Image (cartoon, helix red, strand yellow):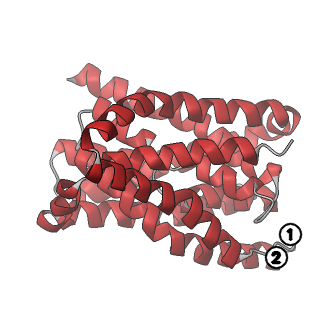
Amino acid sequence: MNTVWIVIPVLIVLMFLLGTDLNKKAFTDVANNPKGVLVGLIGQLLLLPLIAFGVAWLLDLPSVYFMGLVLVACCPGGSSSNVFSLLAKGDVALSVTLTAFSSIITLFTLPLIMSGVSWFVSQQGGVDVVLPVGKLLVQNIVLLFVPMFAGIALRYFKPQTAQQVNKVLSKCAFPALMLLAGVFFLQYTQEIFDNFKVVGLAATCLILVAMMGGSLLSRMGKFSDPVRRTIVIEVGMQNAAQAIAIASSPFIFNSGEMAIPAIIYALVMNLILLTYVWVLRRRA
């Protein structure tokens, strides 16, 4: 069984959840305070892929894991980041806005960056990977933009219903991601154990360096503590479900192995972010 058919419903639900979080205020906040959004997007869309590429290159990851790690970094922020921003007493409106904007922008940046990485891997003597850019763009529109737009429409036309749906789905976001990681873990147990040392190290380095980079960017921007925490979380927490969907999709890479960095990333990411939130709350 191709587990992508489990990934797809989870990803659609998560993106629909994000849409129900969005309202007019989220976008007017961008107009009133674009600096926070701009810095957050720079961290997510530029800094993070560069960090992933550097980590994969320094650790000399095998080609399929090299691409898998960069793929995670090219994905937008995940819906779970909004929950973590709330727990960390961050700027939740900024978190939701960053997740929404990055979801739209990565429709175009992800194929561009991954095409370059595919070429680099092939030039280094690794596997010859061909990225079907058109199919990737269509899949991302169907799985990301359409459900997010449906969530926005529900919030606009039926705000009370959207609020009730959001309350239910928000409780399912984290368990759904863990279920997804668990299913892949069971299917690729041997491969994960065989490569956990190096891929686990790579995923941990990616998250920690990304969070430090987000912290540095936010300090340079002289933001308030809530905004700084949100940027740290948004830069460090990517949509692992989307990375798994792209890697395992029969229309794109059709590679369960390429999804392994995203699976390990999802597990490590939540442990690190939970620790980060715990430290913040202890300080408070």
Residue 67's disc is none
Q: Is residue 23 left or right of residue 61?
A: left
Identify which residue is drawn at 40% across, 50% down. Answer: 151
Location of mark 2 (residue): 122
Q: Amino acid at mark 2?
A: Ser
Query: Where does the image place residue 205, in percent across and percent down from the top left?
Result: 57, 46
Q: Nearer the viewer, residue 173 or 85?
A: 173
Q: Which image quarter is the N terminus in?
A: top right
- Whether residue 71 is visible to the viewer of this picture, yes or no, is yes
Label pair 2/1, CB-CB below 8 angstroms: yes
| Residue 127 position (above or below residue 202) | below
Q: Which image quarter is the C terminus in?
A: top left
Identify which residue is drawn at 52% across, 43% down. Answer: 13
Location of mark 1 (residue): 126
Q: Residues within 10 Å of mark 2 (few under 14, many from 20)?
A: some
Q: Amino acid at mark 1?
A: Gly
Say which element carries label 1.
loop
Identify which residue is drawn at 73% across, 56% down. Answer: 247
Residue 199 falls in which quadrant of the image?
top right
Query: Where does the image place residue 220, in percent across and percent down from the top left?
Result: 23, 60
Q: Residues within 10 Å of mark 1 (few under 14, many from 20)?
A: some
Query: Where does the image place residue 133, in percent across and percent down from the top left?
Result: 68, 77
Query: Where does the image place residue 22, in percent across and percent down from the top left?
Result: 30, 51
